[in-house]
Amino acid sequence: MELDLSLYPFVRELSVRGTEALRSAARPVRLEARQALQREGEPVRRLLLLQTGQLRVYKSSAAGREITLFRVRPGQCCLISLASLLSDTPYPAEVQASAPTQGIEVPADAFRRLHETEPAVRKLVNESTARQLTELMALVAEVAFRRMDVRLARHLLDEARAGRSVMATHDALAAHLGTAREVVSRLLENFGDDGLIETGRGRVELLDRAALERLVAEASGR
């Protein structure tokens, strides 16, 4: 089969034997939006290399609340999947497709063999770890020290006033709130997943104003 892994530079650095091993083991996979890929507590049986779409990695509480840890996009690998797969330990979170997604799956045993023999694969693991640990640390700081989601919701409500549209880029929203663009982008994606807003180029549409108002009110103790 013809595998399109052009988004993953490590593939070009594999040895001839490594390339053949990857191509013989890899299989195409398709996921629908909101389809589960990995359940908490289960072993990681495959590594998914995305070609299109997006994965959402999240934790759920006993009460049913969720928090997004990070998102995996084409050209990226999930840090937690890599760690669990290589150590053969249960996955500590959950993964679902947040959009129609296509990619290539590599069975766990095949990926472990590649990791043992191919420097390019070990480089992929190291780079993915460094990048996503930075994202996770940003999330920890956000949760521990501030409720940026409430500040963002209040700002959107204020800007929209009685209407539904806010004309602002992610950069402009981040500058107003005194935070990083990546934080605002992640929160807007979360609001979108919950059906509260819809984003466009330089625009945010409020789909459920009442829910945003409840979020602000609950945080204020009203």
Image: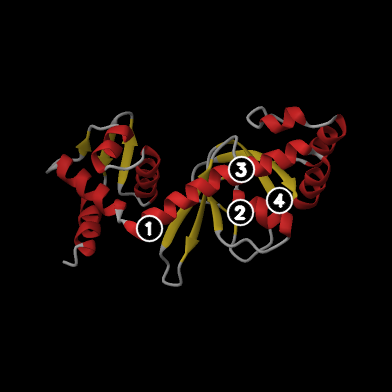
Q: Residue furthest left?
A: 162
> Label 3's element?
helix
Q: Amino acid at mark 3?
A: Ser
Q: From where the camera sits, is residue 135 visible? A: yes
**x, y (%) of residue 142?**
37, 53
Q: Amino acid at mark 2?
A: Ile
Q: Which residue is mark 2?
A: 80
Whether residues under marks 3 and 2 lie with C-beta atoms below 8 angstroms apart, the answer is no
Q: Which residue is mark 3?
A: 128
Q: Quadrant of the N terminus?
A: top right
Badge 4 local density, few (<14 within 10 Å), some, or many (20+)? many
Q: CA distance from mark 3 to mark 2?
A: 10 Å
Counting residues from the start of the chain, the first of labels 1 and 2 encountered is: 2
Q: Amino acid at mark 1?
A: Val
Q: Nearer the viewer, residue 163 or 112?
A: 112
**x, y (%) of residue 83?**
66, 54
Task: Tell me the residue at 75%/29% (across/down).
Answer: 13
Counting residues from the start of the chain, the first of labels 4 and 1 encountered is: 4
Q: Which disc number belongs to residue 46?
A: 4
Q: Please name which of the two marks, 4 or 2, marks the residue nearer to the observer.
A: 2
Q: Which residue is mark 1?
A: 143
**x, y (%) of residue 26?**
76, 40
